[in-house]
Amino acid sequence: DTGVSQNPRHKITKRGQNVTFRCDPISEHNRLYWYRQTLGQGPEFLTYFQNEAQLEKSRLLSDRFSAERPKGSFSTLEIQRTEQGDSAMYLCASSTIRDRNRNTIYFGEGSWLTVV
Amino acid sequence: AQRVTQPEKLLSVFKGAPVELKCNYSYSGSPELFWYVQYSRQRLQLLLRHISRESIKGFTADLNKGETSFHLKKPFAQEEDSAMYYCALRNNDMRFGAGTRLTVKP
């Protein structure tokens, strides 16, 4: 499968612990996005990167959240001091303007976080 | 601010009936709109884009700038169309509506 890959797929953690999710985008996709999705809601934008530069951050992304894409390839999303309200599906997506489906974003299967 | 509204959380039709999933948007520029679909146990995937003016799996969607709408339509629904459907608007990032769960009954 050469699609967007995320791991871990599921994470259960105790409140107050830190968690990190990894996303591997489709090869050569220069844009990478993080979204959060809770039950009954559509994906909510968190942040996106163009290459290694983080270009936009939602105000949903509190200072406990940090995302990196150090070499412009994979990305990590870290949540520090997790709270129960952080329980959600964290979706990663990628895109490129260089193919005929420009601006189409491709999603990973997501990482489920449960904070207990 | 860009916003996407899908007024129906749930929509249920019988097989062979027409279906329309509503989407309204607010955006100050020229919008680029999409429909994404998520079938059971699968990842979110693109269904169609308004600029392609295409029909995918029998679905079409027309951008109506006057009504700021991008409703998704299919004349004859099939059971395999049962899924979550999300309308999305693209600026630099993609903003999604809350989604509509379509159930097509036999």
Image (spheres, coloured by chain):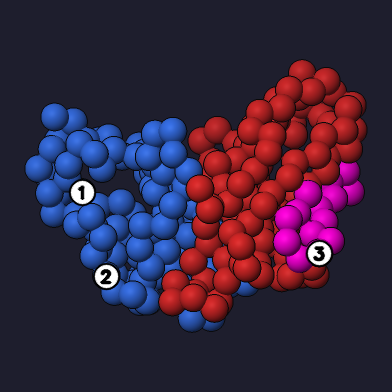
In this rendering, which labeled residue sits more in front, label 3 or label 1? Answer: 3
Out of A113 and A86, give the one closest to the viewer. Answer: A113
Look at the picture and state if B53 lies above or below A75: below
Earlier residue among tags 1 and 2: 1
Mark 2, residue position: B54
Q: Residue at x 44, y 39 (%)?
A: B42
For disc 2, the chain is B
Residue B37 is covered by the magenta coloring: no
Amino acid under disc 1: Val
Look at chain B in the picture and name its colour. blue
- Residue B81 at x, y percent in the picture: 26, 43
Report, in whole angstroms, how far the alpha carbon at label 3 lies from the one at label 1: 45 Å
**Label 1: which secondary element:** strand
User: Which amino acid type corresponds to the residue marked 3 in the rendered image?
Assistant: Lys
Circle 2: residue type: Glu
What residue is pinned by disc 3?
Answer: A71
**Residue drawn at (37%, 76%), measured in percent from left and top?**
B51
Where A96 falls versus B100 (above or below)?
A: below
The numbered disc on residue B57 is none
Read off the residue under disc 1: B19
Viewer-side label of 1, 2: 2
- Marks 3 and 1: CB-CB under 8 Å? no
